[in-house]
Amino acid sequence: MKRQVKKKWPEQEDKVRRLISNLPYEDLRRKYQPNRQYANNSIKTTKYTVWSFIPMNLFEQFHRFANVYFVVIAMLNFVPIVNAFEPGVALIPICVILILTAIKDAWEDFRRYQADKQLNNMPCSIYSRKEKDFVSKCWKDVRVGDFVKVVCNEVIPADILLLHSSDPNGVCHIETANLDGETNLKQRQIVRGFDGSFQPEYFSSIIYCEKPSNNLNRFKGYLDKPDKKKIGFGKENLLLRGCTVRNTDEAAGIVVYAGHETKAMLNNKGPRYKRSKLERKVNTDVLFCVALLFIMCLIGALGYFIWLETFPDIPPFVPPDSNNNYISPALSGFYMFFTMVILLQVLIPISLYVSIELIKVGQIFFITNDIDLYDEETDSRIQCRALNITEDLGQIKYIFSDKTGTLTENKMVFRRCSVMGIEYCHRENGDCLLTALRLGAQCETISDDEDIVFQKPKVPSRLQYRQKKGISSLRRSQSARTHMGARYQSEVFTITNEVAFSSPLETDVAPDRRLLRVTCDEKTQIQEWCRVSHCNGSASFMDFFLALAICNTVVVSTAMLPRQRVSDQHNLFCQVTNDTFSHYDNNVVTLFLRDSGSNNPSRRNSSASHHSEEERGTVSDPNGLCYEAESPDEAALVYAAKAYGFTLLARAPDRVTVRLPQGAVLSFEVLDTLAFDSTRKRMSVVVRHPITREVVIYTKGADSAIMELLDCHGRSAEENKRKKIASKTQRHLDLYASAGLRTLCIAKKVLSEQAYDDWASIRQEAESTIDNREELLMETAVHLETNLTLLGATGIEDRLQDDVPATIAALREAGIQVWVLTGDKNETAVNIAYSCRLFNQGDMVFTLNTDSREQCESILDCTLGEVRRYTAPSQSWSFQSIVGAVMPTESTGPTFGLVIEGRTLSMVFEAHLQMKLLELARHCRSVLCCRVTPLQKSAVVKLVRNKLKVMTLSIGDGANDVNMIQTADIGIGISGQEGMQAVMASDFAITHFKHLKKLLLVHGHWCYSRLAKMVIYFFYKNVMYVNLLFWYQFYCGFSGTAMIDYWLMIFFNLFFTSTPPIMFGIMDRDISAETLLGLPELYKTGQNSEFYKRATFWIVMLDAFYQSLVCFFIPYWTYQGSDIDIFTFGTPMNTVSLFTILLHLAIEIKSWTAIHWGFMVGSVLLYFIVALIFSAICINCNPPSNPYWIMENQMADPVFYLVCIITTVVALLPRYIIRVLQGTLALSPLVQARKLDRLSTEARDQQIKNWKSQRSPSEVPTNLVSPVDSFSNSFEQSFYNSSLEREMPDMQWDSNEETQNTFSKGHRRSISTMTV
Amino acid sequence: HPRDVRTCETNKHRTGSSGEGTTNRPDNTAFDQQRLPAWQPVLSAGIVIPGFLLVGLAFIGIGVALFVTSRSIQVLEVSAPKGFPPLAVPPTRGGPVFLYYGLSNYFQNVRGYGCLAMTTSSGGTCPRCSPSSSCAPYQYDQNTTIAPCGSVANSMFNDTFTLYQLVNATRKTVPLDGKGIAWWTDYNIKFRNPPEVDGSLAAAFNGTVKPVNWPKPVYDLDPTNPANNGFLNQDFLVWMRTAALPDFWKLYRRITEGEYASGLPAGNYTLEIQYNYPVANFAGRKSVIFSNTSWMGGKNQFLGIAYLVTGSLCVVMSAVMLIVYAKFNSPDEDF
């Protein structure tokens, strides 16, 4: 039968999954089920079962080199000829380590098991033929081919092809937050042809779809109906496992992927495993230890051989083997080698690996618990996704940052627009109060005929600034435009005063008075629409706003839905804005006057609550409207349209409803939606106008994408007008871009019925293909989007996140080079770079913008020459110094910035000019790469990482940053507006860019210094202890005797000295967080690996040798020539080495909390208690010279204490003296910083200021910004800068203009230099 | 705190679906935020000068005490050839005098030698039970159990010493006390004799043989004192406590009786040595040591000197630190 079934499906191809309904086969046994070869829905993410746990876990653990070493040693113990002490005892350490790890693994696996069990037993409804209805079953019972029903707010159990929805439009809304973190609702549609009542029994089609893949955005297939009709479907028809159904009462469909084959499960990978730089270093040092062990064992073996040779006859104390035979000295020497390996095995710090893991767990605990890295708005802490690279955070030299969403908030605010070639500056939007006073006075100076004239900046008086500072909305004043560079100050934007009043309610767009008036004038009757639609210019305004409202994928949800949240404050405000225009006109002034009197707390509350809503991309409305946009730009545009009265009321797949300002409600039939993609850089919506019945295409997209497609034909007059509008709009766009706004062009096209029908049939065809459908769909889209009529352009502001300039300044002080890699255009990127202090006003900024190889090379050479001219001539550059990578920040000459465009960048890579670029970049404070693709981003990171051999960090928030995040040593994802792909790929996920400062400067420094010191200490500890045993070999004929009882020896490493270093590695705080933040320079110690250098390792080895010599020979000389027995001799040594090892750590501990004291004192007490108890009960162990009562005897002997005291003092004296001298001379900044820590807070702040002014007098004004009051200071600072700039001669304006021209005309090289 | 209130509200919204209104906010405790009050010592010259001085002076004091004590202990070491070495003993103060035998180049600490255990220790009620395999090869002698087994026991030191004082050309035996020379715990707890059979220790050891190198069986070690036989023979116990270093002493007897109790009177003595134990095969030497003890045990010059040197070094260091302090102390440092 099985064979038959197989034959029945001969066309089971590689690429296609074929499935049919299970219903006809219900109740049949499994082997008769048609879809049985596909995974069912029960999931198992556990690694082990109860039975396989022990073998599999052991197998996994033995994959680690360290454990293998240990096992080999353990087995060596059982080789009789090696003559080991008690083989069983030697197994204890490895067993403890294995058991600890196994317990950890088992616990993790058990948690996975519980989670699986819970998931598998979740209820769901599966259709049953017997019951003729959906019956309740568990998730695990779902199979491919089953019909499953999900109701509102239920989680979807498997990947389901949507066939039925209670929604009349055949739509099902889902929330994909579980999958990708995006909280906006997404629409899914039922497969075409399944409208109306759906009955699973009659479903007889065969489904062909692609094999399971982890690509969330790709799914395609078709239904083969019994009548041979094929119906295509795609990802918009698929409900994904793990998503939640929202706003839809119920939906049903057929399961296509289940269990582990669902997209959610295929995307679910475990945590990432990276090996940190420190760990790689540790591994090489472990190899040194292996070499040392080898040498020591060799000495032991040779020594034994020679020792045996010295005797004239066989002495009574050289034992024969059990058969009473004597082995030849050479052979016994050979065996002795292995005996020595066993004796000295502790030299290889196996427990180091376990300790490092434990320490990292502790460090991650503290990082995730840091309240400064907690974001209240999203209620999220920092996530540490990679568990073992915490210390790399302390060694970063290069940061590669994305711009949008990383430096900026990615919260879009509609700022300006240009409609039909006329610019509307939306002054009200920015500065309500001032505008209210100056209403109409300035905006209206712009006339249609004049070329655009922006207002001269009205230099605000100092007084005005003081006044504004009191206003709470200043919190947001670090807008992208706050710190506008000198380049654009001479332009006509009124930047500073606008921004000072930027509204915290990003969604509340205050309409431009003039534009409002224009639209008000259009208060024509709807009947007149026909007449005015084509020729009347003012109708374009309508079209413009209609396009804003319609041309998007924003989902509108209503008030009844669970996600709805409305605050009263907001209600009040929105009611006004949504009222009729006349009403609005009357109210606007008073409203804004009240609004801006925002010293009252209620205002603050309203802004705050709004804020939390905004961050979910959700915009609520008093009418119960709630906009859920996939990108914040879209929401901003829809909201802008709404502010002008064009309210998007509802959106269904085939219908979109808009309320016009006049109150009329228009319902457009949506014929098609051409979704946005990065190649086309635009999206379009094809609608049928409800009144004119015309087919209209509204397109919005990047200016470059739209401008090329404009209609250039037609009558000459119209053509001229269009051209004029286009060129004006282009000019506006350039200015928007240079002001740091994101630009979009809006265009439309009216299509004839015939043309649309033709196109629609091609489109249909494309949709139903399964292979290269994407390409076909794109072709059809491109085909349609031609000959557009330009309606206008919008400028959307993307605000800088809080504290970005301060963070970048701090990072730079810390010796970190910050590169910004962005896909944005040059002007926008450069402006953001200035505003976030990536470039300073005094910087010389070089721009590389060429696509010719020769030019590229010559520009690089010539720029390099110029840079070298400025940098001190003594600093001759060579390749070696690049590798050494000394930061050039100390030089007093001008600082440089570099802007490079994506095109040029690819040229650099093609022409192998990377080294030249790096050399140039090395001299620059900051590098800005614009218009780069995700692949280029990662290529840049790879270049720097591999060629400069430095630690790199990438930070980004979007899917386009994933490559770069994964390439860098540390990838940081910002969980923000753009979904979770970056977070999923990252090692650490934070919520704000400013968190980077504390994460690196404080936690990075701590984690690195703690772990590095701990590792060094661990090496020391083992070498020191093992050498004691080694020295004794010279007095026991190299026979491998230990003078310490083996139990105590094992306990020594396992209990007595293990916890203090772990505690040290987790908790020691060499410098307080405040000082670390105040003096970012301290970070450089980590960058230069100063805590763990090769020299550090060898110095500590020497110290270990010295200490072990002292610890052995002082007791040796004390007890020499007496009747002392072995263990009585060994006990003081053991005790002394315990004291020495612990006090050595005590010298290294920089801050003693109660916990430190507890662990240190506890360890000593534990030693004495265990040793006393052990020697009291151990009557028969380790005969004949057993440890019975030895500790008690020793502790009754005053000499024991005298030996302990002097040995410890002599052993630690050198290290102590060196540390004292270091502390006195205070040569290293770390010691100085620690001295600062002892001061009171005020004194410390004062000292930090003094220190900074001493170190870099030129940077005093910049560095005045202390972390506490950074806000007010930075504000003052910006004022300081901008007022300076205004008084500067405009000498660089020309070069700017030139730059600008080259930008717009493009393809010409330009180097612009700017000097103060 | 308006901000905090708002957080709570927001969180109620957010976690409304999952049930409780718990927030993800980290605890603002000193421990979690790594702000625990801490003592942050910065080692610098100014602070350590008094410390160095104090430690230095204390060490010098201890060193002087140790040195003086050690000087007061008298040790007389005689290398022991065959025969009757005459000894001129200077007056000794303080008794009792201990008589040690010393072996040099004898590695009692060799692994394997020491590891070969003797079975019948404290649980040694059963001498005929098969002994531990680690006693091999001194485990069985022609399939009879050796008691005590093992190579340590087998190689037991068996020279005997007799001390005579020469008084007017006559030899006067100095009484040697063989009691209490082993550790109290060894004698009373660790080692046990098998229960006597019919009042006879020999019968208890019935079925065992003596170690190969021994002239006498274990129950007959001390013919002069029946209580000093079997596993509880004091010389046996002393030998079984293996020495840590290759040149070692072992306590042979104490001189605690009569006129000799408070130290050997000055005069001429002669030592009669019954030379049984071979040392030629390991190129060793034997010696006999007379020594009295003090609170710090036997004579040991080293510890006192070490304390004196270290103490002086600390004092010197404090002086050096004073110079460093005077030269490099930054004025803004406040102590």
Image (tube, coloured by chain):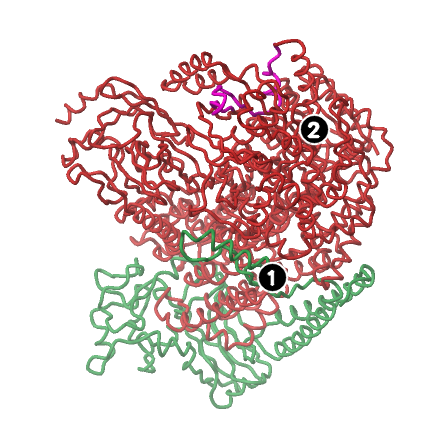
Chain colours: A red, B green
Residue A1125 rendering spot, x and y as whole percentages: 46, 68
Q: Is residue A181 left or right of residue B223?
A: right
Residue A708 within the segment the image draws in magenta: yes
Residue A439 within the segment the image draws in magenta: no
Decide which of A1137, A608 is in the foreground and name it.
A608
Cβ atoms at labels 2 and 1 below 8 Å apart: no
Residue at position x 49%, y 49% in the image:
A565
- The answer to whether A480 is drawn above or below residue A15 in the figure is below
For label 2, the residue is: A423
Q: Chain of mark 1?
A: B
- What SS does tag 2 mark? strand
Residue at position x 27%, y 65% in the image:
B146
Q: Chain of mark 2?
A: A
- Type of amino acid under label 1: His
- Type of amino acid under label 2: Glu
- The answer to whether A1068 is drawn above or below residue A288 in the figure is below
Residue B138 rendering spot, x and y as whole percentages: 30, 61
Decide which of A1286, A345 is in the foreground and name it.
A1286
Decide which of A328, A1253 is in the foreground and name it.
A1253
Q: Which mark is residue B1?
A: 1
Instruction: Indicate which label's residue lies in the foreground, 2 or 1.
Output: 2
| Magenta residues, start to end | A684-713
Q: Which residue occupies the extreme left position in the image?
A: A1
Residue A44 rendering spot, x and y as whole percentages: 31, 42
Label 2 neighbourhood size at 10 Å, few (<14), some (14-19), many (20+)?
A: many
Residue at position x 51%, y 68% in the image:
A1162
Q: In this view of the protein, can residue A348 be seen by the observer?
A: no
- What SS does tag 1 mark? loop
Label 1 neighbourhood size at 10 Å, few (<14), some (14-19), many (20+)?
A: few
